[in-house]
Image (spheres, rainbow, N blue to C red):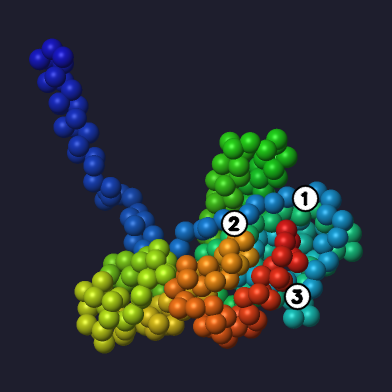
């Protein structure tokens, strides 16, 4: 490269380096929001069926969230005696562990998402949330349904994933939930560790050491920012992740127990039943009977 060209190149690189700072005085720093506690959306399934013959299911329950939208009226949900109509101008967001009935007096034209998300320190009641399907939301839904009608390819599935994530971000942006206290970086790192390695020996002393705190201070800080003790949070995370594995994989119960940090199947089954209300085998059977809903 000629000297003049090298000089111009270096000058250009020098100029560009002035913009390597990821924040400016004029924008909104969203890194702090990303650390506020929402885990990323883990989308398990996106589905659309224009003519479901039988969409009558009682006592639907699952460890993951659901988003329902019906482009045609006629079907509804029942939740604790309340009838929630599914119609073109409304969508329904259903938190994990919500028990409800699907009712279809007509053939169901039905779009759905099954996904997982969580926000430490914020409690969202186990009850359906009705969302107004405004123009922006219906535009995304139309794109998703159109994409579902395309021939199945890897590219089509990538588009479904990105559009589904955009839909969920649009929906969650409308929710009014309590804001938890600012999450310290050390607590965020511990939460990430628990989610990444639930099979590890996640004792209070180990987690406190990872956070660089004394055990007493760590427990106090963890509870302040998540609403749970470290032990309770670890157990609930293990139960949630094992529930997803029971619902979405063919791994044996013994494999799942080991994978998510339980010493044996017996202890896993006892803890799972205590939190979920039934044992792993019964839970898996329920999910298989309700597959695709």
Q: Give the label on residue 59, or none.
A: 3
Q: Give the label on residue 49, or none.
A: 1
Quarter of the picture containing the N terminus is top left
- Give the x, y percent position of residue 220: 31, 85
Earlier in the chain: of badge 3 and badge 1, it is 1
For the residue carrying disc 2, how many other residues have a C-alpha within 10 Å: few (<14), some (14-19), or many (20+)? some
- Residue at position x 47%, y 67% from top? 259
Dot 2: element: strand
Q: Nearer the viewer, residue 23 or 202?
A: 202
Earlier in the chain: of badge 3 and badge 2, it is 2
Distance from disc 3 to disc 1, alpha carbons, whole Å, reads 21 Å
Say left or right for 164 vs 102. Answer: left
- Residue at position x 24%, y 75% from top? 209
Dot 3: element: strand
In the figure, 68 relative to 127: above or below? Answer: above
Q: Mark 2 — residue?
A: 44
- Give the x, y percent position of residue 52: 83, 54
In the figure, 27 relative to 115: above or below? Answer: above
Is residue 293 visible to the viewer in this orientation of the structure?
Answer: yes
Dot 1: element: strand
- Give the x, y percent position of residue 49: 77, 50
- Give the x, y percent position of residue 43: 57, 56
Distance from disc 3 to disc 2, alpha carbons, whole Å, reads 21 Å
Say left or right for 154 vs 82. Answer: left
- Residue at position x 20%, y 37% from top? 17
For the residue carrying disc 1, how many other residues have a C-alpha within 10 Å: few (<14), some (14-19), or many (20+)? some
For the residue carrying disc 3, how many other residues have a C-alpha within 10 Å: few (<14), some (14-19), or many (20+)? some
Say left or right for 238 vs 1. Answer: right
Q: Give the label on residue 94, or none.
A: none
């Amino acid at each position: 490269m000629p000297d003049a060209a090298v000089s111009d190149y270096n000058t250009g690189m020098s100029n560009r380096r002035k913009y390597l700072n990821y924040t400016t005085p004029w924008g909104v720093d969203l890194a702090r929001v990303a650390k506020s506690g929402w885990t990323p959306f883990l989308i398990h399934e996106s589905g659309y069926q224009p003519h479901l013959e039988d969409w009558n299911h009682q006592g639907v329950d699952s460890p993951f969230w659901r988003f329902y939208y019906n482009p045609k009226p006629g079907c509804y949900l029942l939740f604790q005696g309340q009838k929630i109509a599914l119609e073109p101008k409304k969508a329904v967001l259903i938190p994990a562990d919500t028990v409800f009935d699907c009712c279809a007096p007509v053939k169901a034209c039905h779009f759905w998402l099954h996904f997982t998300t969580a926000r430490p320190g914020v409690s969202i009641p186990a009850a359906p949330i009705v969302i107004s399907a405004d123009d922006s939301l219906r535009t995304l839904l139309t794109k998703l349904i159109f994409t579902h009608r395309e021939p199945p390819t890897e590219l089509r599935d990538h588009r479904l994933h990105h559009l589904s994530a955009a839909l969920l971000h649009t929906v969650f942006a409308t929710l009014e939930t309590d804001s938890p206290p600012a999450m310290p970086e050390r607590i965020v790192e511990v939460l990430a560790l628990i989610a990444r390695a639930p099979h590890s020996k996640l004792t209070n002393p180990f987690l406190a050491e990872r956070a660089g705190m004394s055990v007493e201070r760590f427990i106090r800080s963890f509870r302040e920012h998540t609403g749970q003790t470290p032990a309770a949070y670890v157990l609930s995370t293990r139960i949630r992740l094992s529930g997803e594995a029971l619902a979405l994989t063919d791994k044996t119960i013994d494999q799942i127990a080991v994978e998510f940090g339980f010493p044996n199947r017996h202890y896993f089954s006892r803890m799972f039943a205590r939190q979920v209300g039934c044992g792993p085998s019964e839970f898996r059977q329920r999910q298989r009977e309700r597959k695709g809903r």
